[in-house]
Image (cartoon, rainbow, N blue to C red):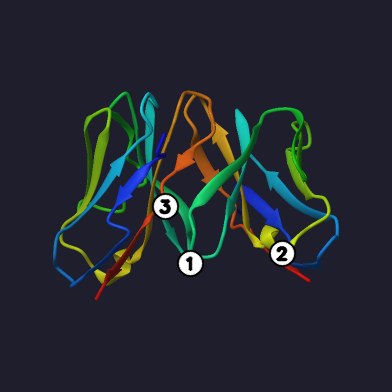
Amino acid sequence: KNEVEQSPQNLTAQEGEFITINCSYSVGISALHWLQQHPGGGIVSLFMLSSGKKKHGRLIATINIQEKHSSLHITASHPRDSAVYICAVGTGTASKLTFGTGTRLQVTL
Amino acid sequence: DAGVIQSPRHEVTEMGQEVTLRCKPISGHDYLFWYRQTMMRGLELLIYFNNNVPIDDSGMPEDRFSAKMPNASFSTLKIQPSEPRDSAVYFCASSWTRSPLHFGNGTRLTVT
């Protein structure tokens, strides 16, 4: 069993839809990261959180430490949101991350 | 800041050749990480450094892989000899302690 599980693996949505991507993990963590990777592109850190909720523009990330679960929400989705979203958990003081397998999101017009 | 800079962007080489990937982290960051990404295994940590010292190299696949960080502004990942199964995208990332990672654009390695 992977330490970090994401769902769904693939997601197709129409522009404007509200999107939720889920991440569950099985180990104690110091922080959870959400990353974004566009096709053929680099990786961008969206959020790093250890409790509660963070918001940046149309993106919202939440984490429930007791349930070992995090969600990434995208409000009013847009085709430019099409990317792979990766959940990763870090332990200790370093950002030594264990990655989920990613969720491939496609937003269509 | 220019961000994390990796070179080359693409590398095509023949099996058995030596490959050297380079990384310049963001100035002031005290952690540097090397990751490998493949379709089959996703992202995997190979090795990371703290203040130029290797801390954990348990992800390095075998002795053919080596990494150095001679100073705070430069790191290399070397594969010698290279094999087709080493084909992947190699990412370098840097960060401060307990801070988000900043990734380079990656080096796409193809070993034929």
Amino acid identity at mark 1: Met
Circle 1 residues within 10 Å: few <14, some 14–19, many ≥20: few
Density class for disc 2 (Cα within 10 Å; few <14, some 14-19, many ≥20) is some
The residue lying at 38 percent from left, 25 percent from top is: B30
User: How far, Cα to Cα, is label 2 from label 3?
Assistant: 22 Å
> Which residue is label 3 attached to?
B105
Q: Position of residue B35 (x, y in %)?
A: 40, 49
Give the chain of mark 2: A
For label 3, the SS is loop
Is tag 1's residue or tag 3's residue first in the polypeptide sequence?
1
Q: Nearer the viewer, residue A65 or A17?
A: A17
Residue pointed to by mark 2: A79
Q: Is residue A45 above or below residue B12?
A: above
Q: Nearer the viewer, residue A71 or A78?
A: A78
Q: Which amino acid type is shown beneath numbered disc 2?
A: Pro
Q: Amino acid at mark 3?
A: Asn
* Image mark 1: chain: B
> Disc count in the image?
3
Q: Label 1, on which residue?
A: B40
Q: Are marks 1 and 3 on the same chain?
A: yes
Callouts 2 and 1 close, C-beta under 8 Å = no
How far apart, in angstroms, are the residues tagged by discs 1 and 3? Answer: 20 Å
Q: Residue at x 31, y 53 (%)?
A: B61
Residue A17, quarter of picture: bottom right
